[in-house]
Image (cartoon, rainbow, N blue to C red):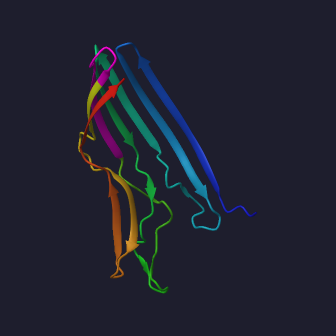
C-alpha cells in the first residue's frame, strides 16, 4: 500500500494545580505544532486543520460550607483554515465551477477567548435525601468566537462565506436530588 502523506505532531503541556480543602486553582498551557506533509500538494507541508498552537486555561473553585463557586478562563490561538485565492477565486473552466484556494491552511481564525462562572449550593431535603442547586454563566463576556470558516458557491455562482460563531452569554440552572 502506497503511503500518501505524513503527519508530524510536536507539543508541550504544562499544568500547575494547587488544592486545599477550601479551594482548588490551576493553570495550564499547551503548545502544539501539528503539520501535514503531502508531496503531491503544493506546498507539501502545511498545518493540520485542528492545530491550536497555543492554549491557556486559568480556573479555580472555592468552597465555603455548602456553597461552591468557580470561575474559568480559556484562551487559544486561532486554528488554520484556507481562504479562496484573492486574484483568481473561481475556476470557470470546469462544470460545475469550483473555488480556487490559497495554499492549504495558510490563514488563521481569530483567537478564541471564553470566561465562565458557576455557583452551587448543597443541602439536605431530609436525612436520606440530598439536593444541589446550581447556576452558571458560560461566556459571560459575550464574546463572539469564530469556531470555523468555510466557503461555498451559491446558486448565483458567487463565493459565499460560512462562519460558525460560538454562543454568546449562556445562562444555565440546575437542581439535583440524590437519594
Q: Quadrant of the N terminus?
A: bottom right
Q: Quadrant of the C terminus?
A: top left
Q: In this picture, which residue range is highlighted in magenta? A: 112-131
Q: Quadrant of residue 28?
A: top left
The image shows residue 103, relative to residue 29, as above or below, that is: below
Q: Residue furthest right?
A: 1
* Residue 16 shows in the view: yes
Residue at figure coordinates x 34%, y 61% from the top left: 163
Q: Is residue 39 left or right of residue 59?
A: right
Residue at figure coordinates x 41%, y 17% from the top left: 19
The image shows residue 28, relative to residue 151, as above or below, that is: above
User: Is residue 39 shown in magenta?
Assistant: no
Nearest the eye: 91 or 160: 160
Q: Is residue 88 left or right of residue 66?
A: right
The image shows residue 72, relative to residue 109, as above or below, that is: above
Nearest the eye: 154 or 56: 154
Percent position of residue 10, x then y = 58, 43
Nearest the eye: 54 or 94: 94
Instruction: Report the predominant secondary structure element of the magenta stretch.
Output: strand
Q: Quadrant of residue 149?
A: bottom left
Percent position of residue 57, x then y = 39, 34
Residue at figure coordinates x 48%, y 28% from the top left: 15
Amino acid at each position: 500500500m502506497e503511503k500518501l502523506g505524513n503527519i508530524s505532531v510536536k507539543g508541550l503541556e504544562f499544568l500547575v494545580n494547587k488544592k486545599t480543602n477550601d479551594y482548588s486553582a490551576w493553570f495550564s498551557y499547551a503548545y502544539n505544532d501539528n503539520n501535514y506533509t503531502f508531496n503531491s500538494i503544493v506546498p507539501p507541508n502545511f498545518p493540520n486543520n485542528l492545530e491550536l498552537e497555543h492554549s491557556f486555561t486559568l480556573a479555580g473553585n472555592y468552597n465555603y460550607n455548602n456553597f461552591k463557586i468557580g470561575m474559568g478562563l480559556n484562551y487559544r490561538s486561532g486554528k488554520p483554515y484556507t481562504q479562496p485565492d484573492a486574484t483568481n477565486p473561481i475556476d470557470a473552466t470546469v462544470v460545475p465551477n469550483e473555488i480556487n484556494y490559497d495554499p492549504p491552511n495558510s490563514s488563521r481564525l481569530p483567537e478564541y477567548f471564553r470566561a465562565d462562572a458557576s455557583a452551587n449550593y448543597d443541602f439536605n431535603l431530609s436525612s436520606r435525601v440530598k439536593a444541589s442547586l446550581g447556576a452558571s454563566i458560560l461566556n459571560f463576556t459575550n464574546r463572539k468566537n469564530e469556531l470555523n470558516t468555510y466557503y461555498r458557491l451559491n446558486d448565483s455562482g458567487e463565493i459565499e462565506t460560512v462562519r460558525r460563531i460560538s454562543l454568546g452569554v449562556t445562562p444555565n440552572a440546575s437542581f439535583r436530588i440524590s437519594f
